[in-house]
Amino acid sequence: MGVKLKVNTYVDIAVVDLKEKALDASNSEKLKKSMAETLNDYEKVVLDLSRVEFVDSSGCGALLSCLRQLGDRGGELKLCGVQKNVQRLFELVRMNRIIDIYPTKDDALKGF
Amino acid sequence: MEQEHTIEQAYAPEEPRQVIIADDDLTTLKILERTLEKAGFTPIPVSSGRQVIGHLSGAVCAVILDIQMPEMNGLECLDYINRQYPDLSPIMLTASDEVADAVYAMKHGAFDYIVKPFQASQITALVSHAVHSFEQTIRLREAEESLRQARENEIYVASRIQRSLLLGKPPTDFPGVQIAHMTIPSQEIDGDFYDFIQMDSQSMDFVVADVMGKGIRAAFMGAALKSHLLRVVNETRLSTEGRVFIEPEEIVDTVYSHMIDELQDLESFVTLFYARFYPKSSRLTYVDCGHVQPLHFHHRSRRVSLLRGGNMPLGFPEKEPFRQFNTTFEAGDVFLFYSDGLTETRSRSGELFGEERLINFMTAHGTDPPDDLIQAVKAEVVNFSGTAEFADDFTCIAIKIDADSVPLELLGRQTFVFDSRLDELQRVRRCVRIFGKKYMRRASDEPRIAGIELAAVELTSNIIRHAYENQSGHPIRLEAVAYPREMTFSFYDRGKPFDPDAVPAPALDRPKEGGMGVYIIEKSVEEITYSRGGDGQNCACMRIRWC
């Protein structure tokens, strides 16, 4: 079983709504797999993390892996809806410097 | 010049070379006497072993001994000469039926033997040879002696430098700590040094260092390092009116820039550990530059952890900013600082004493008073090596936190057990959050609670993935303890031990997918210590402090 996620499309942009409360060592590998399957057809992707309360280092690793996969194909990944505790972790490991983070989904869509 | 003079005093080659000839057959004695006189020697003819002994002196450079003689025979006489004049090695005269005796004599220090009857030329050649060999031996021994004296002199000078300049005395009136220290200089002085610097009423600095190499050069380098260090400290004192503003990492960095040219010119390097104790707030700040890792005995858990730093020794070409680390301690905790001379002591069979043996010893004796502890460490090492003579300097300093300096009131304690499965991580988070919230109740504490949650998840997934290699069904025990403004979360497992030093620091300019966990833990809690008990149980203890 993969992670729960829902994909909506806005013209050529895929918005992935991650329906998990935590992104940690127990599901980070699954996220990588599900995202790889989902994202093959898109170059512009927004990952909505507004339901995610907790991310650990392996969660960060999975996000970086998605970023790299898309980047290899010339695509772009943006995040939105990042909760405070998760934002603090991203700053701690300096992820905020290499992934664009927007407050809301609309801001992210405008960012492309 | 001194050296030649010494040799001449002991043995004067320009004087006639005296050769004792001993035979009870007067005809043989006459022939020998005439032969040797012709060859330029000064023969001393005698007819018994006892007479030989009467004529032995420093001026005699060869002896010819007949084996069969009255009073004391040739072999007994040989034995005596061997013991009293080891540089002389007699030539034995034998009859043809005494060859077995001659062989015995050769085995027991005779120079050679001649079977009677003999030719005059044989005697001359052999005596010349024996005299030459004797003179060589004397010269060699004299040269060795003056070399040894020179070395002793150097050791004396170096040990004076070390005693008077390098080894400091602990402050006697600094409240909150008890200090015991000991240095046993080896036959060859190292550049070991340590010192205590009382910065202000709140903190005490302690530094221990080891200069590579031995002898005067190492001792001077140590003295230079120490003077740079004290200068940096004193200059700061003058400028800051009684309060310490310079952090240990800045002190080490400044000393480094003063010393690096000298160190590189001499191709030398220094390992160093700089520690600053704050007994009132139970904190220790330290910088480690490649020194042996000091031990921290935790009184409450009776466990030992290592103070890990990770900077390179001073003088290594790689220069990274010196990083300082913080740790906390409790009443009854003991820090043991030492030099590698201790752990690198070998047993008779060549086995190293090693860090692990010291850790086990400390685990068993950590509650001893500091003086007793370092005496016991010394006794243990002496017992292990079978000798009280050390090849390297042996330095050992124990600093114990007084029992009444840090009273801590226990507020709460709870134990949780998890299975080694990744889907337990959620429960780990919940347990840690609920426990933490009981004592950190303000809304502004939320980031701290989130940090503890994060560190706990990172620790638990490390245990599951590395200690238990992703095998479920193993227990992970979490013991959470709360004190006023302090909490500890100790995770116990029985899997493979974890070495945080083996994990490289993540490259934060380009975050990667792995290797961030250890870094995240270090950044999320005040202190993390990893230890392994004698029972094979690993313990990772994170400590949280807040105001």
Image (cartoon, coloured by chain):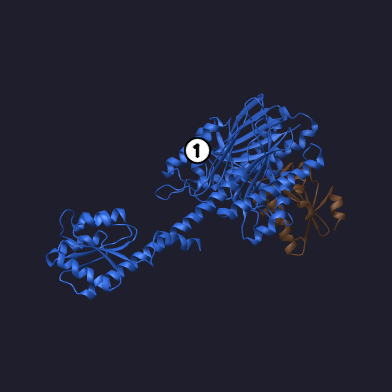
Q: Is residue A3 visible?
A: no
Secondary element at tag 1: helix
Q: Residue at x 28, y 73 (%)?
A: B39
Q: Chain of mark 1?
A: B
Q: Quadrant of the C terminus of chain B?
A: top right
Relative to the observer, which residue lies in front, B398 or A37? B398
Residue B57, image x, y percentages = 32, 57
The answer to whether residue A94 is above or below residue B239 is: below
Of the pair B509 and B227, the residue shown nearer to us = B227
Residue under pointer 1? B377
Determine which quarter of the picture holds residue B74: bottom left
**Residue B381 in picture, x, y percent from top left:** 47, 41
In this picture, is B1 found above or below A80?
A: below
Where on the picture, by quarter, is residue B37?
A: bottom left
Q: Which chain is brown?
A: A
Q: Colour of chain B?
A: blue
Eyeballing the image, is A69 above or below B310?
A: below
Instruction: Say if residue B381 shows up in the picture.
Output: yes
